[in-house]
Image (cartoon, rainbow, N blue to C red):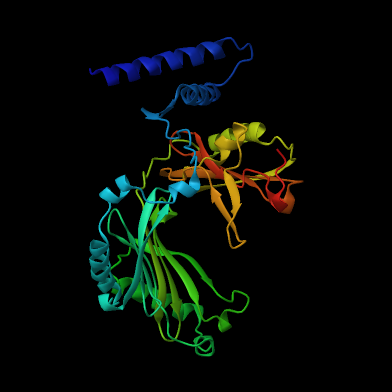
Amino acid sequence: MNNEELNRKILEKVKLKVAISNFEKEEKPMSKQKILKMVATFIITIGLAAGITYAGSAIYENVFTKPEKIENYIDELKVNEEELSKIISEEEAVNKAVEELKRYKIDLNTNDIENIELQKDPNYDTITYVISTKNKDNFFVDANSGDLRIFYIDDGLSLEEVEKCTSSREDILEQAKIKMKEYGYGDEYKISYVNCNNSDNEEKAYMWYITFAKEYDGIFNEYQSVTMTIIPKINKVTQLSIENEPFDDNPIEISEEQAIEIAKEKDKIINTENHIQKNIESKLAIVRVNPQVYLKENGLENGTETMTLEDGRNFSYNTYKMNGRVRKAYAISIFYENRTFGMPRTYYVDCTTGEVIGGDDIFDLHFGADEE
């Protein structure tokens, strides 16, 4: 028996012994089923405090780590010498783009290239080559992997011409499916999102936005997806973006009921404004670990700062890294009676470890007023 297996067995026995001894002190008789359920909950709670989680027959390490603050965001926008030494060259980026665009039936003529620039996103540690042409087409290539991420193609039509390019929802979805097959994407990509430029009257819509995503346990993964903007009638894709981030595909070990209880306990700490809880909604989702809950729980700023540029425009940015792992989690939305706009706080409870790994709309920032 190796050390890892030995430690696991010792930990299981210690946890079970401690848990059962606590319940033996109870004077009120309990059913066997209730005792086992409470013991399981106790084990998960102890594990979370120790930085590990016991679930079923496996022990999982916690996935959430303290978020990294970006001390000087403006400086971090610049690509430094060390980063330059690790990325592909402009020539390689262009060659990669030329090859990958063939998949989308786009012929990038290198003589038409007008500008190439590097763009860095400090929040996600990404560096991208942006290739612009005389025809106002733009192509975004990952400077590390060489993968094509986004393209924008000028449709060459006037607004009057585009407005005549309407179609039914059924026809446009069929066109989009055909495009995906032409591009070489398999049946693992399914339609997860559909919208248009005139949702009030789809018959007048002349631009449709459609996302195809991979599916896991009945959940769409937007981090492994293809999103296109397509003009009906002329069947032209003017924009396409590809997401293909690593996904843990972690197992579901925590029940929805347990996740709700974990979120409710966390909300007791987060809800410093004493909003009155109204109801709770829950669903499984694929999310990115983020620092929102951590920041508020630890009395830190919300992470968003704004500066005024020389031309008078305001530039907002997040001062924390947002490049957390992509995981399956329960998205637990807690609604309140007295929160502005009726907005809920949504807590992401990892469905394997039971950790709160982030959330959405955690801070009260409506109308620019943070109530902390």
Q: Where residue 218 sits in the image (x, y, percent)?
A: 43, 53
Q: Is residue 59 visible?
A: yes
Where 213 falls versus 42 (above or below)?
below
Q: Where residue 270 sits in the image (x, y, percent)?
A: 64, 35
Taking the spot 59% from the left edge, 34% from the top edge, the residue there is 261
Q: Where residue 243 sits in the image (x, y, percent)?
A: 38, 58
Q: How many labels were placed on the picture? A: 0
Q: Where residue 73 sits in the image (x, y, percent)?
A: 49, 46
On the rendered image, what quadrant is the C terminus found in? Answer: top right
Question: Residue 59: which quarter of the image?
Answer: top left
Taking the spot 40% from the left edge, 74% from the top edge, the residue there is 176
Q: Along the line of sight, which residue is nearer the eye, 120 or 259?
A: 120
Left or right position of 177 against 267: left
For the view shown, which residue lies furthest in the front direction? 310
Question: Residue 215: which quarter of the image?
Answer: bottom left
Taking the spot 68% from the left edge, 45% from the top edge, the residue there is 364
Left or right position of 5 against 155: left
Left or right position of 253 against 32: left
On the rendered image, what quadrant is the N terminus found in? Answer: top left
Taking the spot 55% from the left edge, 12% from the top edge, the residue there is 22
